[in-house]
Image (tube, rainbow, N blue to C red):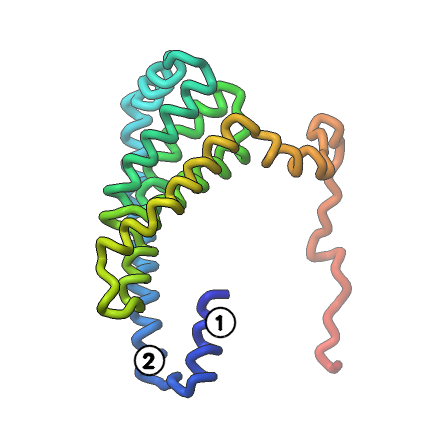
Amino acid sequence: MGVAGSVILAAFNRRLNWTMFWHAMDTATRISCMVVFILVGSTVFSSIFQGYYGGVWIEHLLTSLPGGVVGFLIFVNIFIFILAFFLDFFEIAFIVIPLLAPVAEKLGIDLIWFGVLIGANMQTSFMHPPFGFALFYLRAIAPPEVRTNDIYLGAIPWVVLQLILVALLIFFPEIVTTFLDAGPSVDPSTIHELDIPTIEDLPPLDFGQ
């Protein structure tokens, strides 16, 4: 959707040309390759870490935190918030989350709600220095008289609001789970047979049409 919108806006402003399109494709390819290499590296790291029973050590460490589930959630959110100052959200999602999700499941935490909670926390990484992408975007379009310090200070209220959202999600999980519980649910134990059509069951193709 972002790419389609950008192309439409560039064409509407008569700035869309082959040079710009090629530059956009080149940049997108580089970013995609970076993300794929991060994913490959994080997968290798997780495999080695789990092979040396690092996951068991992390699980024992986090499940023994005081406060039970609430203590675990508070620690994890503070930990990710601090990491977001120095790591991109790609690294956090691919490396840190796979280590935390099994512990959350062990504690009986709904993983969908846990994902929404962590996603809301990682949103703050866009708004605080030194790697806040939103700050760099604003710096690129702001007039010269707007100082970088002003942009950083102006982002503080939004970071506080985001942290309030994280706190609300922790203490009022029904904000997310209400919509999950309202949807249809299927008990896998009640499924006795799956009827999946094969290629022989499909009608023949008529290439003359």
Residue beneath disc 2? 20
Tag 2 secondary structure: helix
Circle on res. 208: none
Q: Which residue is mark 1?
A: 4
**In terms of sequence position, does the residue under pointer 2 or pointer 1 come before the other?**
1
Location of residue 122 (image quadrant): top left
The kind of residue on which mark 1 rests is: Ala
Q: Is residue 139 left or right of residue 191?
A: left
- Residue 135 found in image quarter: bottom left
Q: Specify the amino acid type for callout 2.
A: Met
Where's residue 56, x and y in %? Answer: 35, 18
Would you call the spot at circle 2 few (<14 residues within 10 Å), some (14-19), or many (20 or more)?
Answer: few
Identified at 30% across, 67% down, the residue is 142
Which percent across, then down, holds residue 181? Answer: 68, 33
**Residue 39 in sight in this render:** no
Q: Judge left or right: residue 173 versus residue 17.
A: right
- Relative to 152, 116 lies left or right: right
- Depth check, front residue: 43 or 167: 167
Q: Nearer the viewer, residue 97 or 198?
A: 97
- The residue depicted at 38 percent of the width and 85 percent of the height is 15
Q: Residue at x 44, y 73 (%)?
A: 6
Residue at (25, 47) in percent of width and height: 129
- Please determine whether, in this image, residue 40 is positioned above or below residue 50: below
Q: Are marks 2 and 1 in contact (CB under 8 Å)?
A: no
Can you give x and y, in whole percent of width and height, for residue 161 in the image? Answer: 43, 41
